Amino acid sequence: MREALAFLENLPPVLTYFVLGAGAALENLVPPVPADTFVVLGSFVATHGRATLMAVFLVTWIANVSSAFAVYLAAHRYGPAFFQNGFGRRILDPAQMDTIGRFYDRWGIAAIFITRFLPGFRAVVPVFAGVTQQRALPVGVPIVIASGIWHGMLVLLGRLAADNFEQILAVFATMNRGLLAVTMVLAVGVTLWWRRTRDRGPSPEGAGEP
């Protein structure tokens, strides 16, 4: 953590923004990238005059939303063909894709909004929104709003860290552990649904969502 902070503190402001924006964008492509930590540290650096809080917020928010929507668009264009044949069909069969589509039709906006706060799921959910051909507006709006709230909270944490760095980092770590626990529970639920519904053929209209 301190090594990352030292790295950011030694960068010129323009490069600081670039690193933060790249991290915020890459988490939608490579979920293990610790983008949230970099946003907090970047905000901490901003309080010491190396950048500005508003710029840190805007750069990370816009980069995160843009990459999430780019992933959605790519999945919307190429996803259906991928899952119809070969390896993609082994991941999700047509009946499962149909169930996921109905889930998005009913709960898509709420699901996308909530999962933007959850590590891992925030990268996956826009992908399947695209694969199931969800409309752009119901996908984009919750991504924009939830990502704005989340990055605003991270910037605020970084600002507060200027007064008590160790304590704020401890709060951040606790928060992340809680979110990760929720993510793991949901991951187990999705895995159980996948195993239960695998290769059972087309599910009846109105069947339960994943």
Image: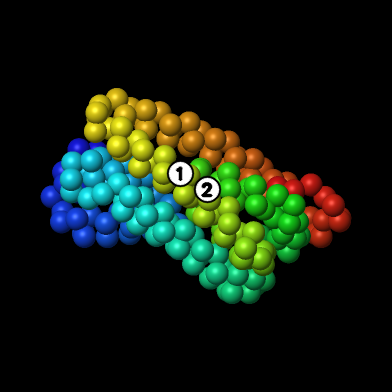
Three-letter residue code for mark 2: Ala
What percent of the width, then of the height, locates residue 77?
A: 59, 74
Residue 155, picture quadrant: top left
Callouts 2 and 1 close, C-beta under 8 Å:
yes
**97 or 123: nearer the eye?**
123
- Indicate left or right for 9 with 156 as reference: left
Residue linked to disc 1: 150
Between the C-alphas of marks 2 and 1, the distance is: 6 Å
| Secondary structure at numbered mark 2 | helix
What percent of the width, then of the height, locates residue 167?
A: 29, 25
Residue 146, labelled with which disc? 2
Q: Give the quarter of the figure containing the N terminus.
A: top left
Three-letter residue code for mark 1: Trp
Give the residue at x 15% y 56%: 12
Q: Tell me: residue 76, above or below residue 63.
A: below
**165 or 98: nearer the eye?**
165
Give the residue at x 62% y 63%: 137
Q: Please say which color scheme the image uses.
A: rainbow
What percent of the width, then of the height, locates residue 151?
A: 41, 46
